Amino acid sequence: MTELSALLQRPQEALDPELAAYLVDSPLGPVIKHPLVFSIPHSPQLNAMANARLRAKQDGCRQALQSRKWSQYLFLHERPYRVNAFTRIAAQLTARTYWTSLAELWIDAENIAENEHLWTTLLQDSSRVRSRHLMMTVAERRHLAQQPALMRVYRGFNSDERQEGMSWSLDAEVARRFAMRFGGHGRPRLATGTVERSAVIAYLSGRGEHEIVVAPAAVRDQHVTGAHRSRGRTTLGG
């Protein structure tokens, strides 16, 4: 019998109070969205499994903190909570670890807008900003340095509140794919703007998206067009 089967065949146990505090209704039914444990959808039959995962992850976090395995600590958390976990260890990090860890989290994140104020605070921390170039690899810094002083950037979105954001691209086709990624639902559109190279927080190539991280207010001269699937691939900004 596997460990999973054993957990499912246990007599139903009460949900840990810490998890119960994160049990909410959703269109999928009850779900748990705890910083360490997601259970979607959740039913009482899954209580034992969720409780066991919570205990295992709590132990893992304690061990990671004790051994200063910062990346392990961060990635034990569920994705939406990792940037919050970062704030709990930030003061202990060297400059290099601070910025490389933040880059890892940014590249892995799926919805920066949910915590945009927190991201902005971390990225513009006055005590850290002088070493912010460490968020990029040597190759990324070189690529950014080769861009013109005034860069053209693109952002794909499909609802009005998504036009403004910190994540843009040098590649119009990448931005178009983001606009279309939900099958064209909503109003897929492409925002084009310009940003001074000196205002760019980072250029990140880790996902092949030629991503420009920038404060939304720094993107000027914006105009918006409808986003449509393109037969060709156009790379701009260089």
Image: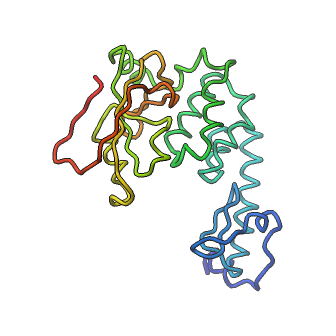
Establish if 74 lies above or below 120.
below
Query: Relative to 79, is 236 above or below?
Result: above
Quadrant where the image shows the N terminus: bottom right
Q: Residue at 61% across / 35% down in the picture?
A: 119
Work out whether residue 177 or residue 185 is closer to the camera in this orientation and state it. 185
Q: Quadrant of the C terminus?
A: top left
Relative placement, left or right, of 168 versus 9 is left
Nearest the eye: 125 or 94: 125
Is 196 above or below relative to 2? above
**Residue at point 41%, 22% (across, down):** 195
Residue 81 is situated, as x and y percent measured from the top left of the image, at: 65, 49
Seen from the viewer's position, the closer of residues 156 and 122 is 156
Q: Residue at x 42, y 25 (%)?
A: 220
Q: How is the image coloured?
A: rainbow
Using the image as rendered, state which of residue 15 and residue 114 is in the foreground: 114
Q: How many marks?
A: 0
x%, y% of residue 52?
A: 73, 67
In this picture, residue 108 sits left or right of residue 75: left
Q: Residue at x 73, y 75 (%)?
A: 48
In percent of width and height, residue 204 lies at: 43, 31
Q: Quadrant of residue 8?
A: bottom right
